Image (cartoon, coloured by chain):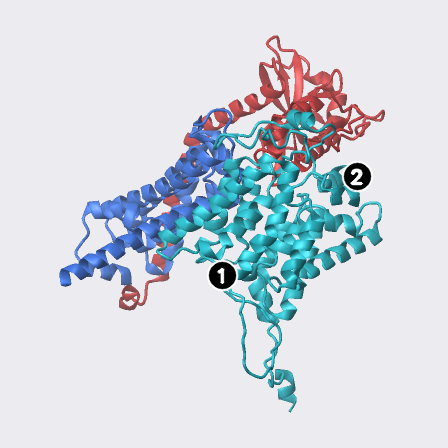
Amino acid sequence: MKTTMTPGIELRTSPHVVKGNSVERIMFHVVLALLPIAAFSVWQYGVSALTSLVTITLVCIGSERLFNRLSGQPSTLSDWSATITGLLLALSLPPAFPLWMGAVAGFVAIALGKALFGGIGYNVMNPALVGRAFVQAAFPVAITTWIPAFSPNRFSEFAPTTFTAPLMMPPDISVWAKQALDGFTGATPLAIWKFDNVLATPADFLSGSVTASTGETSAILILLCGMYLAARKFLDWRIPVAILGSAALTALVFQAIDPNRYPDPLFVLLSGGLMLGAVFMATDMATSPVTPKGVWIYGALIGVVTVMIRYFGGLTEGVMYAILIANALAPLIDQVTQPRVFGQVKAAKEKKA
Amino acid sequence: MSEATLQPATPSAAMIRTLGILSTICGVLIVSAYQITLEPVAANKKIALERAVFKVIPGAHSVKEFDATSAGIQPAGAIVPEGAVKFYAAYDQAGALKGIAAEGAGKGYADTVRVMYAYDPARQVITGIGVVSMRETPGIGDKITTDPAFLKNFVALDVKLAADLKALANAVKTVKHGSKQNAWEIDAISGATVTSKAVGKGINASAQKLLPLLVPHLDKLQGGK
Amino acid sequence: MAASSLNHGQKQPTNMEEFMEGIWKQNPTFVMVLGMCPTLAVTVSAMNAISMGLATTFVLVASALLVSLVRNIVPSQVRIAAYILIIATFVTVVDYAIQAISLAVYDALGAFIQLIVVNCIILGRAEAHAAKNPPTRAAINAVGMGIGFTIGLFALGSVREILGAGKLFGIALFGPDFQPWVVMVLPPGGFFVLASWLLLFNWLDSRKAAKAQTEEGRIHA
């Protein structure tokens, strides 16, 4: 595990008392920061979201324990990383995602995304996104089946898809969803924009009444929680800033080219999983670059790729693949952006001399 | 490599002779395999073709293969004339022309989508489609064979020729889901637009080429038992 | 020829050992990881996998037999050309044969039937085994290799068909409500399943090795 990245060197007189940030402490605070988002989503989607969050997190923890045992290593549950993977995964999936598919996603996330590489710190890509990518490819219909937020019966009634029997196809919920909330179309703002060219307003996003994955509707809450983590130096603020900045800039360029076809930057920032991805997923320390310049390149890449996939790809949302691609490139970015060691002269200059 | 050093000079004639003999043996093997399988393969192909045509033209009893060229239409022979478009005429039990089937191909999401469509010469419409081959995503693209709303497009898809008989009066076009207005438009499946478009493009390209060649000579196909 | 002297140096393997070599110790799919192109491409169903396996086995056995028969008259300078000629011949034969047996299978396997020509298992066996052994031994070894390859393909094809379609040999296993895992019939599914099998075999292997070591240690102690 690459530990914290405290920039700069502090020069002080003795005594030098430094309380370092341990992995456990950082991870624990990330869990704390995720809790308000999870709580908000439960308030929005009711018991379906709650069961999904709990189940997927427990599956991730269970899988982590299983692989610890299989590889004969001590338990790594206390570092909270499996809990974070579970929470993030559940937050990035639709609230009524069948539990058995969620369990598959959780297991794949830990097995394929983490254990296979050797556990925490060795994984190349964000485990939660690996799990999500797998179920996106395996169950393309279920992962784009949405339920309305704030339906009146949300605390007493489960979505019909939640308790789908394992290996079975979830039932069609269009009738149930319409009855749960009048006028519900079952499409995300990104899909409505892409196929019908209708834009959701910022007010829709801020009130959380749009159709989305469990934890993707509360942009302000995500930003606040992110700010808390950044203020306490538990995450690198430059990554979300670079992602959101480059996404907004790319959107701005396209809007300037054709304002009728491309939406405004605010829509791009608020819709889909960009906020959640930028603040909580792309900032995973093991899978993002460590050099100061590299962090900016990494973030900018995610922002641009996300917008490109949304505008020109077959899918409506591209954050997941953008982050996975950037994750894979992170070691390369690190390599080409190595800062010069102090006192070392550039090779070219050396030749001249 | 010990052999090579022991006998450094293999005469060229020996090499050529060995390869020559071997080639002859292999040639005999290949040709005899071809001859033996010729009949069953042809029978298999006929059955497969009939199955595909009968699926889009229900009630058909026999199928004949034709080539349409600018010089007219003739039964398909061993030599395919240049610029020929292949089509199949289906006849019912009494030997009357039941319908015409032809193949169209369009680039889909994963690979080329090949469809067989049925053309009703009397009404100048397409009356059905069947997929010959595709590799589209299961559960999404392959809905073109199952989605009832999509298949409804092909109950009577307008492919009327323009007055000069040179091209279709209206090109067959796949439109966005829910926006079909004319009889020559195909309403795409929402979420499988690329595959739906491939079907439309394939049919359009094939019909644009085939129908101007075919329609002036339709009478030759009647009673072609 | 280096390999052959090695072979002759040790004692001749029995026919049974010859046969089992391809099935277990040198399994083309799980141990040698050869012929990956058809392994990943056509194994979307158990039927496809078995058809491909049998087609490859036929080519493998027939070409091993012929290569072994002509091994003493083909000058080594032109042997590769000769082997490829023989292999291509049998691939053409099997191509026609499949068309005659079932067009559905022929369409499902597509270009991968013709690509058997360049399957490295076949040329590899011709060069490394058939060219140095009498026809019976070559044929027995080739049958084992072919069956080993077929087992490998079937292992992938069955898992991919069960998860990807809920069926095995086209028979539905879980009823009409089964949710297909679409990814399993797509190319990534092939990689996932192959990786899982390799993982399983290597894990079993390393466990066996570890056990053997501890036992040996005990004996020496």
Q: Which chain is blue?
A: C
Query: Is residue B130 left or right of C215 when viewed as pictured?
Result: right
Which residue is under mark 2?
A198
Q: Position of residue C17 (x, y in %)?
A: 22, 48
Q: Considering depth in this image, is B136 or A156 the residue closer to the camera? A: A156
Q: Is residue A231 above or below residue B19?
A: below
Which residue occupies the extreme bottom position in the image? A353
Image quadrant for the N terminus of chain C? bottom left
Rendering coords of residue B29 (x, y %):
38, 39
Image check: A164 left or right of A351?
left
* Real-space Cα separation, disc 2 to disc 1, in angstroms: 42 Å
Name the subunit of mark 2: A
Considering every residue shown, the one lying at the far top of the view is B94
Decide if residue C58 is in sight here: yes
Residue beneath the point at 69% across and 21% down: B152
Say the numbered circle drawn on residue A121: 1
- In the figure, the shade used to draw chain B is red
